[in-house]
Amino acid sequence: DGYKLHGIDVSHYQEEVDWDKLRAIDQYGDTLTFNFAFIKATEGLLIEDDMFDEHWEDAKAHHVTRGAYHYFLPDRSAKIQAANFVSSVKLKPGDLPPVVDVEELRGKNKQELVRSLREFIKQVEQAYKVKPIIYSNINFIEDYLADDFKEYPFWIAHYYRNELTVEDSIQCFFWQHTDKADLLGIKGTVDANVFNGSRADFEKLLLH
């Protein structure tokens, strides 16, 4: 409640999305429209999500604001991972900034994780001329990312809460508030998100 812009995030787990019907009914019987979608593009060194191209084009065709994300593996080359993402994702004006999804250490300590993630972000930022958004769950952010990435916007996963409370130093732009949304237009459940700001703030975030 109280958020103006709602969105989903999808990958190959959501094979069928009826983009014209992306709606939910809230507890008061009001219809919520989903305005944006984060779409999984790549993972690790070589993987491109099987559904990326289809979801990417469909979102654009149905006037859903789209963003692309990379699932980051800290124990693999950050430069090659960035090249994988950049070669797969052609961002255009009106799209959301690129996103890096980092959720695991994979044997690395905090210092090694931060160094590798910074290298990935540097490459992506140079390619698209915009600061990427960092996605993770609230605990991983507070434990490993908050101290070293204060200048970057975050998309935070924190489920089943009425409101999101984070440290003032964390720039929370998006909140993934559930992984069990049941929406018209998608078979099965899906992650649901809100934008933490006004429509004008959202428009400023988009690529120009």
Image (tube, rainbow, N blue to C red):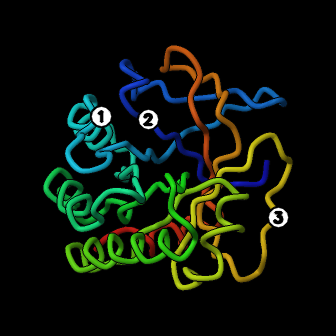
Dot 2 surroundings within 10 Å: few (below 14), some, or many (20 or more)? Answer: many
Residue at 64% across, 57% down? 156
Is 22 left, or right, of 195 in this rendering? left
Q: Which dot marks residue 80?
A: none
Upstream in the sequence, badge 2 or badge 3? 2
Upstream in the sequence, badge 2 or badge 1? 2
Residue flagged by tag 1: what amino acid is it?
His
Q: Position of residue 74 (x, y in %)?
A: 42, 59
Dot 1 surroundings within 10 Å: few (below 14), some, or many (20 or more)? Answer: many
Residue flagged by tag 2: what amino acid is it?
Val
Residues marked 2 and 1 touching at CB (< 8 Å): yes
Of 102 and 3, the residue lying toward us: 102
Q: Which dot marks residue 165?
A: 3
Residue flagged by tag 3: what amino acid is it?
Thr
Residue at 54% across, 52% down? 104
Residue at 47% across, 24% down? 21
Q: Position of residue 122 (x, y in %)?
A: 31, 79
Is 34 left, or right, of 85 in this rendering? right
Residue sitting farthest toward the left: 87
Q: Position of residue 1 (x, y in %)?
A: 79, 47
Q: Is 48 rendered above or below residue 93?
A: above
The answer to which image quadrant residue 57 occupies is top left
Q: CA distance from mark 2 to mark 3?
A: 25 Å
Q: Is 28 rendered above or below residue 64?
A: above
Upstream in the sequence, badge 3 or badge 1? 1
Q: Which dot marks residue 10?
A: 2
Q: CA distance from mark 2 to mark 1?
A: 8 Å
Q: Secondary structure at mark 2?
A: strand
Question: Quarter holding the C terminus?
Answer: bottom left
Of 94 and 166, the residue lying toward us: 166
Residue to which mark 1 is pinned: 55
Residue at 63% across, 69% down? 144
